[in-house]
Image: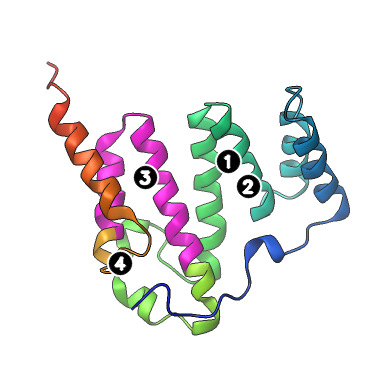
Amino acid sequence: MDLLDFEAQGLYFDTKDAPEVEHMISTAAENYADGSAELPLLRAYFLAPTSLNVLVALNRFYYYQHRLEDALAATTKALAVIRPLIAFPEDWRDLQSHHISETPANLLTQVRLYLFTLKAIGFLNMRLELLDVSKTIFEKLVLLDSKDRIGAQGLLELVIKRQNETPIQN
């Protein structure tokens, strides 16, 4: 299946949150430069823990603050929120190509979001030097995406190169 051959529907950011949650996200964006963005984002999270708008905002905040473990936690939570929307297996390792090919066309946007979120998890693990985890994720994505629409092939090659450069420690 070509993961670019579909009409985008149901984009996560088109989903409206409660006004208070949207206000918290907006406040965080306004306060990023002065360092007080985290509290409004956490308030938004407590109000809407399954909002992809909130989880993506948390991921971006933590990533740009170089708090990679926190970014990974937000991204992992986002994957858990997306998964039941498309009836994918609970563990991404169990994901097979038929899960994607059997997904109704109106859910392909969510499938791509899931795969890009999994790629982000792999990338964050790579940045955290958890190379075996990121390699496994990227191998899975390459297996599922033969046309490399998600862009995991290059990251897999980087991980393998990095692993080959890293001396074995006893």
Q: Earlier in the sequence, mark 2 or mark 3?
A: 2
Mark 2 residue crowding within 10 angstroms, few (<14) / some (14–19) / many (20+)? many
At label 2, the amino acid type is Leu
At label 1, the amino acid type is Asn
Disc 2 to disc 1: CB gap under 8 Å = yes
Most prominent secondary structure in the magenta stretch?
helix
- Quote the CA–CA distance across marks 2 and 4: 25 Å
Disc 2 to disc 3: CB gap under 8 Å = no
Q: Secondary structure at mark 3?
A: helix
- Answer with left or right where residue 41 lies relative to residue 119: right
Q: Earlier in the sequence, mark 3 or mark 1?
A: 1
- Answer with left or right where residue 148 lies relative to residue 104: left
Look at the picture and state if 102 lies above or below 46.
Answer: below
Q: Secondary structure at mark 2?
A: helix
- Quote the CA–CA distance across marks 2 and 3: 17 Å
Region in magenta: 112-141
Q: Secondary structure at mark 4?
A: loop
Q: Quadrant of the C terminus?
A: top left
Residue in the foreground of this view, choosing between 76 and 29 = 29
Q: Earlier in the sequence, mark 4 or mark 1?
A: 1
Q: Which mark is residue 122?
A: 3
- Quote the CA–CA distance across marks 3 and 1: 14 Å
At label 3, the amino acid type is Gly
* Residue 107 in the image, given as x and y percentages of width and height: 53, 76
Q: Which residue is denoted by mark 4 in the rendering?
A: 145
Q: Which residue is denoted by mark 2 in the rendering?
A: 55
